[in-house]
Image (cartoon, helix red, strand yellow):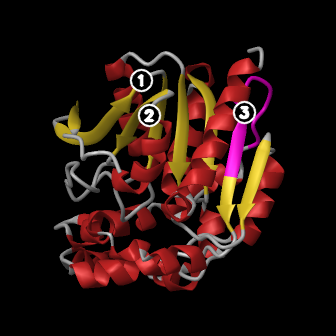
Amino acid sequence: MRERIVLESLDFGGMSIAYEHTGRGEPVVMLHNGGSSHAIWDDVANRLADKYEIFALDLLGFGDSAKPGAGYTLDNYVAMLEAFVSSRGLEKVALVGNCMGCAISLAFTERHPDQVKALVLCNPLTESTFLSGWLGPFLWLRERMPAANRQVYRLLGKLKLTNGIGSVATRFQLGPRGRALGVNRRPELCGSYAATGQMESLLGVLDDLENYSVIDNLAPGPGFPPVCTIWGLKNKIVSPRAGRRLNSTLHPAREEWLADCSHLLMLERPDEVAAIIDEFLQAAARTPA
């Protein structure tokens, strides 16, 4: 494993956005899922850093980034990514996302297709893929009783989870392979759930879920960068079955389905996921614009 790197930061409207910067080569921006941090990409980044310059961000409200208690909307996350790309002077970047990181990547690319060379999307979050997952039924309160929902979210948002509960939350996101590897016992993963304000951030993302329906309706046209999707077939958070429907409109140039993996497939099969990312980005680089 590579040594832990001191995080750099971006000022986004007076709020600090932390990110890990490593490697050299063509730029790749990695975006994590809700509830976690840039640490989910450590294993993959370690395998790719000799070919690519990698920026693994902590999204607003997560990891070491600011947790303002508001602004956890898809539009604001796209604005955050716009600010990051501009601040680093990245003219053509590959985007690699997991869950909500995929939605941010797709929404950014729809607005700025000329700034993106390719997208690798792991377990994309949309309104449909989440509502079709195991946790979808719990959002009935948000849809039917929005006022009560906001009060519940305010109360839950003040909770600080323990590392033990964080381990349980991480285990829920793993398939058979990840559980066998004990991925949920890694402190940099389960510890993020114990950070003050992180639960409030995650609930804020879920409160904006209806706006992720734009990804369900996205039909990339000519000039849209090539897309690769990677799904864990044991995923409980977002539904692989709904993912197949999503792929029918996204029309990915490459799609992968990992049988024994779930929501954190980049930690469950880092060698395979890194190879898929590398092969796809190399193929995209050979394709005429």
**For the residues carrying marks 1 and 3, which lies nearer the camera in this image?**
1
Image spot of residue 237 (x, y percent): 55, 73
Q: Is residue 198 left or right of residue 42?
A: left
**For the residues carrying marks 3 and 2, which lies nearer the camera in this image?**
2
Look at mark 3 in the image and give the residue it sits on. Answer: 226
Total numbered circles: 3
2 and 1 marks in contact (CB < 8 Å): yes
| Dot 2: element | loop
Q: CA distance from mark 3 to mark 2?
A: 22 Å
Q: Can I make out residue 278 in this image? A: yes
Look at mark 1 in the image and give the residue it sits on. Answer: 24
Residue 81 in which image quadrant? top left
Look at mark 2 in the image and give the residue it sits on. Answer: 49
Comparing 104 with 208, the one in front is: 104
Q: CA distance from mark 1 to mark 3?
A: 22 Å
Eyeballing the image, is 76 above or below 89? below
Amino acid, disc 3: Pro
Name the residue: 29% across, 84% down: 165
Q: Is residue 259 left or right of residue 142?
A: right
Where are the magenta residues, as a range? 219-229
Image spot of residue 30 (x, y percent): 46, 42
Eyeballing the image, is 82 above or below 6? above
| Dot 3: element | loop
Comparing 235 with 11, the one in front is: 235
Amino acid, disc 2: Ala
